[in-house]
Image: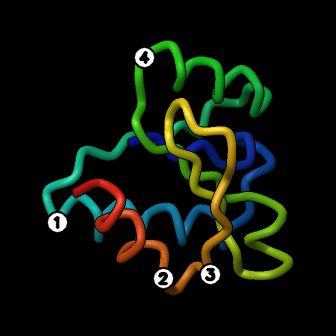
């Protein structure tokens, strides 16, 4: 599972805090989590996620800061699912099982 966020130097404190919290919650439930906070464009990081076969991609960015929403995309799927941040861990655990 990979969670590209806003690029490293542009990542807000709230993005970073939420990423850390979600990482801990998912890891404690036995899920393998990789946070991609490299200072590269989202497109490059999304392409890398596809190349290494990441099954679920979570995007934490502008919509998180504005509306408290994250996006989940299943590998090979066409659509992204918007999820309130409070439901993120439970939704990802459900998708991963």
Q: Residue 4 appears in which quarter of the rendering?
A: top right
Is the residue marked by circle 4 packed among few (<14), some (14-19), or many (20+) residues within 10 Å? few
Element at label 3: strand
Element at label 1: helix
Where residue 18 sits in the image (x, y, percent)? 54, 71
- The front one of 4 and 80 is 80
Name the residue tied to disc 1.
28
Dot label at residue 84 = 3
Is the residue marked by circle 2 packed among few (<14), some (14-19), or many (20+) residues within 10 Å? few
Is 73 above or below relative to 97? above
Element at label 4: helix
The residue at 68%/48% (across/down) is: 79
Q: CA distance from mark 2 to mark 3?
A: 6 Å
Q: Nearer the viewer, mark 1 or mark 2?
A: 2
| Image quarter (top left, top right, bottom left or bottom right) of the C terminus | bottom left
The residue at 52%/26% (across/down) is: 49
Determine contact: label 2, label 3, CB under 8 Å: yes
Name the residue tied to disc 4.
52
Name the residue tied to disc 2.
87
Q: CA distance from mark 1 to mark 3?
A: 21 Å
Element at label 2: helix
């Amino acid at each position: 599972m990979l969670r590209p966020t806003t690029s490293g130097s542009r990542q807000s404190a709230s993005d970073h805090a939420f990423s850390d919290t979600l990482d801990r919650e998912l890891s404690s439930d036995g899920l393998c989590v990789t946070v991609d906070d490299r200072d590269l464009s989202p497109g490059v990081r999304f392409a890398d996620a596809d190349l290494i076969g990441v099954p679920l991609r979570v995007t934490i960015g502008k919509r998180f800061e504005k509306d408290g929403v994250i996006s989940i995309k299943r590998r090979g799927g066409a659509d992204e699912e918007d999820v309130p941040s409070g439901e993120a861990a439970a939704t990802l655990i459900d998708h991963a099982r």
